[in-house]
Image (tube, helix red, strand yellow):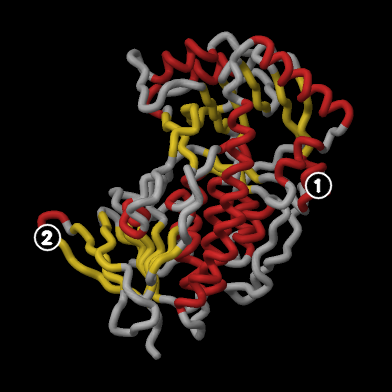
Amino acid sequence: MGQRTAIVIGGGIGGLTAAVALDRRGWSVTVLERAVALEPVGAGIGLAPNAQRALDTIDAGDAVRAMAVWQAAGDLRLPSGRRLARTDNAAAVRRFGGPVAIAYRAELVGLLAARLPEGAVRTRAAAELVDAGDPERDDRPARVRVAAGGNGDEELTADLVVAADGIHSAVRRTLFPGHPEPCYAGFTAWRFVVPAPARPYVAHETWGPGSLWGTVPLHDGRVYVYATATVPPRGRAAYGERTELLRRFGDWHHPVPDLLAAVDPAAILRNDVHTAAAPPPAFHRGRVALLGDAVHPMAPNLGQGGCQAIEDAVVLAHEAAPDTALGPALAAYTRQRLPRTMDVVRRARRIGRLATWRSRPARALRAALMAANARLAPDLALRALDGIADWRPPAATYAAGARGTRTAELPKE
């Protein structure tokens, strides 16, 4: 039997992790990315211990931890600056075996791409699934059409296609045409990265009327900012997104005004938040596996969107061993990933709804509950990640020396 071939549609974090994991398992992998370059969507990403363990299996965990910032604590606040609670990463280490690492998405994308063979990633390659193929028939590979600009289209075949083509996945629609599209979660998100303000600040997440703001340091001295607000979908600010953010958040506590004053309006990303409307029939069909946002988009409130895509990638590569029949391997992938990720989708949706509360009584109740929980049960907030952040990858690893059971620790003072 010759070397198995795989095509990954989409060069985001999930797609690149899958490509690296499959390459380490002996597959010949080609990544097709429609953009002109590997440009990550978003600015920062939180990598919980479950994602770090998954990255350990492809020998990328240590490199990720080296380029991530470790924050010992952060505040949960109201727009006035009143602190409701303090989060403690040491508690996360005790509970889940490691803290959350905050990384710059562009650096993570570059790190993963650098682990692929030269020429494995093709940009300006818009891909369309033509035939899902049949894993039981060697004469029926999956077929993908690639738009090659003025040179016309070309057709590629592969033993496996991994669809990591995002929330509005064309591959998902082709495989399951009757399945409901992802639905609007009820709020929009803004994200950007700016230099740290001159005045000292504390990492924080602040909850306001139907809105939320987060300020998180990056390892290079810059700051990752994310914000959400309950607004109608498909909206755009008439006078620019910076003006919209100033209107909504400009009078909130330090360092929010300073960060808004520092941001280049062109650097602000705005995206409606979508979540899976219903569980799909499966995460695969034929020789095609769906991964990440293409199959389980979720609200960002648990910080698990990218983490679950990374988990998908390493589980898929684990099941698709070179000497394993592909049909049973993909069925095992669905069995492991569908119930887990749909549970995370539901849990993230529940927490996301809390951020949409706008009435004064509802917000007062929310603040009182958060403050009481912080006093009476300091680790209570972490329980939202029980069964999620403590996940460990399959026992077998995908590269010699990988450490699937590594426990990350906070750096020593």
User: How far across and how far down the image is residue 148, in percent?
Assistant: 18, 59
- Secondary structure beneath label 1: loop
Name the residue that disc number 2 marks: 152
Name the residue that disc number 1 marks: 412
Residue placed farthest to the front in the image? 178
Gap in angstroms between the C-alphas marked 2 and 1: 57 Å
User: How far across and how far down the image is residue 106, in percent?
Assistant: 47, 46
Quadrant where the N terminus sits is bottom left
Q: Which mark is residue 62?
A: none
Name the residue at 53% across, 11% down. 250
Quadrant where the C terminus sits is top right
- Mark closest to the chain's N terminus, 2 or 1: 2
Name the residue at 29% across, 52% down. 34
Q: Is residue 253 above or below residue 299?
A: above
Name the residue at 22% across, 63% down. 145
Looking at the rendering, which quadrant does residue 206 occupy?
top right
Looking at the rendered structure, the kind of residue marked 2 is Gly
Say which of 216 and 247 sits in front: 247
